[in-house]
Amino acid sequence: MTILKGVKCTLIKPHPQSIELIKKHFAGLTNVTLHETTIYDYNGKIELVQRGSSSFVSELNNSPAITNDNYKTDDNDKFTIDCKTFDKLEDGTIDLLSIDIEGSEWFVLKYIISQPVVILLETHESIYLNPYIKQF
């Protein structure tokens, strides 16, 4: 089964351009829930850096863009958005969880309610190593 055939899907995305693409692609599907926020260790506001198609929390000193691409944070790439702990966005029914949030993956696992059968998460890429790898 796929999302387009009715599988329940919850998407969490902070970046405005990605949000618009997701809304357009899944328009009219009642099985898709989109949260326009990001996940972190508290509920409130947080500053993100948008680098190409990825975004990361500005207070993290390590992300694939920084480590692999030698990206230097530019104030023009920063934006502020709501952030939430993962338990505020999930209902305990997740079977498959895929996490790729540029260094903040640990905060999903820290607050998860569900007990997924499968969890996919980014731990490394090229020379990048997730800053919370020891907590996994």
Image (cartoon, rainbow, N blue to C red):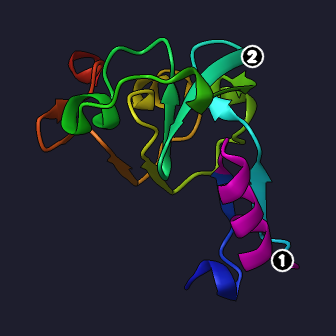
Q: Is residue 110 left or right of residue 111?
A: left
**Magenta stretch, residue numbers:** 12-29
Badge 1 marks a residue whose secondary structure is loop
Q: Is residue 8 left or right of residue 105?
A: right
| The one of 22 and 115 positioned closer to us in this rendering | 22
| The one of 77 and 107 positioned closer to us in this rendering | 77
| The one of 66 and 93 positioned closer to us in this rendering | 66
Tag 2 residue: 45
* N-term mark: 1 or 2: 1
Up/down of 21 relative to 116, above or below: below
Q: Residue at x 24, y 39 (%)?
A: 69
The percent coordinates of residue 8 (x first, y second) are 69, 67
Q: Is residue 114 left or right of residue 65?
A: right
Badge 2 marks a residue whose secondary structure is strand
As for residue 47 lying within the magenta part, the answer is no
Up/down of 19 relative to 115, above or below: below
Q: How many marks?
A: 2
Up/down of 127 relative to 125, above or below: above
| The one of 79 and 34 positioned closer to us in this rendering | 79
The percent coordinates of residue 49 (x first, y second) are 54, 29
Q: Name the residue type under label 2.
A: Lys
Q: Residues within 10 Å of mark 1 (few under 14, many from 20)?
A: few
The percent coordinates of residue 27 (x first, y second) are 83, 77
Tag 1 residue: 27
Q: Name the residue type under label 1.
A: Ala
The percent coordinates of residue 105 (x first, y second) are 42, 32
Where does the C terminus fall, quadrant-wise?
Answer: top left
How far apart marks 1 and 2 lie (CA) works out to 28 Å
Q: Is residue 112 left or right of residue 131?
A: right
